[in-house]
Amino acid sequence: MKKTTIIVHQKYLTNVIKKLHELGLMEIIDIHKNGSEEFKDTVKASVHPETSLCINYELRLSRLIGILRKISPKEKGIKNILNPKITEIIDIEDYSLDEIYSQIEYTLSDIEKKILINEKRILESDDKIENLQIKIDFLRYIEDFEINLSDVGKSKYLVLKIGKTNDLNKLINKIEKLEKTVIYSKQLGKGKNIEWGLIIVSYLSEFDKIEKICREHITEFNLDGLNSTPKKCIIELKNELNNIENEKKQIKSDLNIYSKNQLSNLYVLHEQIKLERIRKEISNNFSKTNYTYIIDGWVLEKNVNELENTVSNISENNIIFNFKEPSINPDDPPTHIEIPKWAGSFKTLLELFGTPKYNEINPTIIMGIFFILFFGVMLGDAGYGLIILILSLFFYYKFSKFKSMLKDLSFMGIWIGLTTTIVGILTNSFFGDFIQRFIFNDLSKLFYSFEIFGINFPVEPIRDPLSILIVALTLGLIHMNLGILLALYQSYRNKKYKELFTKHFTWIILQIGGGGLIGALLLHIWELNTIQFYLFSIMVILGLLLIIIDSGPLGLFGITGYIGDWLSYARLLALGLGTTGMALAFNVVAEIVPNMIPYIGIVFVPIILIVTHTANLGIQALGAGVHSLRLQYVEFFNRFYEGGGKDFKPFSTKRKFTKIIEYE
């Protein structure tokens, strides 16, 4: 990474910004926010005056796109899922800003007013439909009453109220206390949803009393403007409702024509003006003098020459470049995580923990490989592995061209599925003991049998957990020591030699010396001659002294922590046993169901197997993923990795709907 400063004459600023945007090689930082002493006497550049115009056009185009997207018909169902639409990329000329303005104005003048008017009509129609539907719903409560709705309210002698209640008895008790009031009701609904439609007729002399009762006990209906019986009004309102809905369909049909003819063009114009707006806003990060602008940022070392040559040409060499090595403090350079395309999904796992600092090792590939390996060991069933493999292959070949993230995740799923399948074969697990129990009808029958390094394969976790535990702890020892080796290299690269010996190298000699002594004196695995005994003892003593030098006497507690981290890899066995045990239990249940339920019990066997194994796959895969990540983040990263860095984000053009035509 190179700290980069560009000084350009104001005449060429627009061209330089456009070229930097197209190249996508330089991350531009706010020169004043960064607090650079070199430019403290310069003036902060303001946002380009045309930024507000670009924003205005962008918002207007966004609004039209939003309206037409909502209107355009969308395919639903499995067919749409299996065959999603590919975004159309349109080839365009490299237009100037004035040409883009002209195109936008021409398009907006032709369709904007019409689309907005139609949207307004749709909104008005929705309001009318909602109001009509409310009135129809109200009328359902009183449709059997033969009254003229124009009589509702106060007349010369009477008061007529209509509404609903959910406590008729309480209302009747109140009404019965009035001498000149009657109530008519109709029940709707059942059980807890029971309600009553009401008509209350009262002499005007009891108006105040009936008003109070209605406020407390009924929901009154507002049906102003209706002048017939409820049944006739329902018919009239339904006809009006149908007319409005037909009118709304016609408006939508008109808008759909705009969507078919103009939506892709609106996307193109929106993307162009958005890019121009970004270019106008970026100048707010610059400093300026009377005749020049100063741009500050970061460039990858490998791209320095390309940046300098290309931008110099566009500015006719009226530009000055300054490249320098960054310092961790105060420059705080960003981190560029460079990984092969196939490891893209591993970067996501790393960023869940944190981006590496500028001077830290990039552990992405190593972490990803061990994540897949540990996941496969923890899930450890060939049947489940095949399901993951098949689904991942399907998603990879069917959907990877639509989203890069889906491509990365499905690619990782392929390797997870393969690893899980291989581990399942080595541990004789295919949906637990499904094949032995339901196909061979012999739980002791094996597909194969062979021996490597004294270990008989297949190794069944339930019958021989010790062998799996040995493999798990061996993998853990390899994993942790790989972290220590990375820490040694990182300390060496950053010239932290004291840390190299006292913080990291100490664990190498402690493991060798301590392991040699424990294997001989406690476990009696091997014998040591006098020279070996003293050599291992010296290594242990030296390791302890280095710990004390680094962290003091309390640092010795780190030994128990290290052992605890190592034993944490026993979870590889624990989760593997969990997967196998649950699968076996579900198979047993499915096997005994026909005996428990004669004749029809056999029908439930496939249902039980499918449901339970699906649930087991989901739960165990989640556990394997979480615990595998934990081993990376805690046991592995604890040796060398802190994170907390920031990504290198170059100022680059991101196009989704357009592609500039390049002429030779």
Image (tube, rainbow, N blue to C red):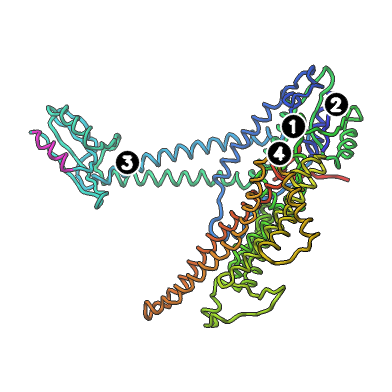
| Secondary element at image label 3 | helix
Range shown magenta: 168-178
Using the rendered view, name the quadrant where residue 197 is placed. Answer: top left
Residue designated by label 2: 8
| Callout 2 touching callout 4 (CB < 8 Å) | no
Using the rendered view, name the quadrant where residue 297 is placed. Answer: top right
Q: Residues within 10 Å of mark 2 (few under 14, many from 20)?
A: many
* Disc assigned to residue 279: 1
- Which sits earlier in the primary sequence, circle 1 or circle 4? 1
110 and 327: which is toward the camera: 327
| Secondary element at image label 4 | loop
Q: Is residue 388 above or below residue 15?
A: below
- Which sits earlier in the primary sequence, circle 1 or circle 3? 3
* Disc assigned to residue 329: none
Q: Position of residue 57 (x, y in %)?
A: 65, 32
Observer-side mark, 1 or 3, equals 1
* Disc assigned to residue 645: 4
| Callout 2 touching callout 3 (CB < 8 Å) | no
Three-letter code for the amino acid on which mark 4 is drawn = Gly
| Callout 3 touching callout 4 (CB < 8 Å) | no
- Which sits earlier in the primary sequence, circle 2 or circle 3? 2
Q: Position of residue 238 (x, y in %)?
A: 35, 46
Q: Residue 38: tell me if it is visible.
A: yes
Q: Is residue 287 above or below residue 617?
A: above
Three-letter code for the amino acid on which mark 3 is drawn = Lys
Three-letter code for the amino acid on which mark 1 is drawn = Arg
Residue designated by label 3: 135
Observer-side mark, 2 or 3, equals 2
Q: Position of residue 382 (x, y in %)?
A: 61, 70
Using the rendered view, name the quadrant where residue 228 is placed. Answer: top left
- Real-space Cα separation, disc 3 to disc 4, in angstroms: 61 Å
Three-letter code for the amino acid on which mark 2 is drawn = Val
